[in-house]
Amino acid sequence: MTISSSLNAGVAGLSANASRLATISDNIANSATYGYKRTEADFHSMVIASKGGTYSAGGVRVTTQRLVDERGPLVATANATDIAVRGRGFIPVARATDVEVSNGAEQMFLTTTGSFRTDADGYLRTESDLILLGWPALADGTVPSYPRDTSAGLQPVQINVNQFTGEPTTKMTLGINLPATETASDSEGTMRDLSVEYFDNLGKSESLIIEFSPTIPTTGSSNAWTMTIKDTARPGQTIGQYAMTFADDRASGGTLASVTTVSGGAYDATNGTLIVDVGSGPMEIDIGRIGESDGITQLSDSFAPVSIAKDGSPVGNMTSVEVDANGFVFAFFDTGITRRIYQVPLVDLPNPNGMVALDFQTYMPSPESGSYFLWDAGDGPTGDIVAFAREESATDVAGELTDMIQTQRAYTSNAKVIQTVDEMLQETTNIKR
């Protein structure tokens, strides 16, 4: 009957608006929850075929959807490992219980923000027991190629805060000026020496002793020097000796004109480098290219180490950890060195709203969300990672309050329909009397 369909439609209206009020309540309750994604209720009318000129009310159905692709504003924090995604993409995390049990690969969950801090085992972990996942870097800081369509290569990011580390010196650059007056026939021919510290494979300090001996001609100036290199790790041994001459023409005066190898590794004129064997292995020394003034020069009357640079560092303690915009996790040491230890990818899916929503603002891919892919942060369709930041709730409280008033009015109206139908049925009952 038409009147009974009106009753059913009113009941459906009450149920639909009650569901909408539940989503509004959830949104308002989580208006201060970091990373919360707003839930939306949609109404859909039901149409029942009418016969004989009568109309039957079909009522309404409600569907709810969590808008995972909506992002809240970012807010700055004081913790270096508070991270948030700016733009598209999700951060992979695992539950601490999965990591601690160690029964194979951890189940990957996704989130858009988290306040990670090291726990007793060094894992970067949130207060809700979510552990950050990433690809581990090799000892030299490079990240190998991992499969991008599976989470199999991801590992819990674990920081050894008590770690000691050092880096051996493998390259050195010498920017030194030799006095041109010392190669004149009337000079005393004073030898000049220089000690340059380097670090061996165990982080110990050693030194290269570099001696420059001028060649004194009978007349005029020779513009020639002999460079002898010794190593404190090999006392009494000469690890390299080189005869150098310098140009004295107007165009390139004072720059290297030639380098002849007496002993040690051969001089590479293309790169301006030579390789000597120190106690910890081969070391490349850049003395400058022929005709250029960025290495060893011979000008005026002063001996001056203008610029000496080298890689390597002594053993130091880890002081802090940070995540950069590309998802690389860097460890900082008190010796000034920085080491890349992990890379956190960003996970992207065709339909983020199709994921399964779980507790603690985490989500799990599903058939409705489509297949996921692990991107480098800032590459492809994904955004980047912001450190010292959290993502606030995507709830607009003012908008939710407005929707709540509308829902209340709609609920009251549907209740009035039921009341009216009840009165009409009562009148129908009275007719029989």
Image (cartoon, grey):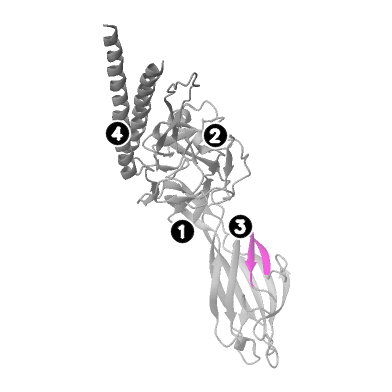
- The part of the chain drawn in magenta is 273-287
- Residue beneath disc 1: 336
Q: Are marks 4 and 1 in contact (CB under 8 Å)?
A: no
Q: Is residue 160 left or right of residue 392?
A: right
What crowding class fits label 4: few (fewer than 14 Cα within 10 Å), some (14-19), or many (20 or more)? Answer: few
Q: Is residue 322 left or right of residue 228?
A: left
Residue 19, percent from left and from top: 37, 28
Q: Which label is found at residue 369?
A: 2
The earlier-in-sequence mark between 2 and 4 is 2
The span from disc 3 to disc 2 (Cα, nearest Å) is: 58 Å
Task: Provide the secondary structure element on which disc 2 rests.
Answer: loop
Q: Which label is found at residue 429?
A: none
Rendered residue at 66%/63% (across/down): 276
Q: Are marks 2 and 4 in contact (CB under 8 Å)?
A: no
Q: Which label is found at residue 409?
A: 4
Return the residue nearer the eye: 389 or 205.
389
Q: Amino acid at mark 1?
A: Gly
Q: Are marks 4 and 3 in contact (CB under 8 Å)?
A: no
Residue 32, percent from left and from top: 32, 42
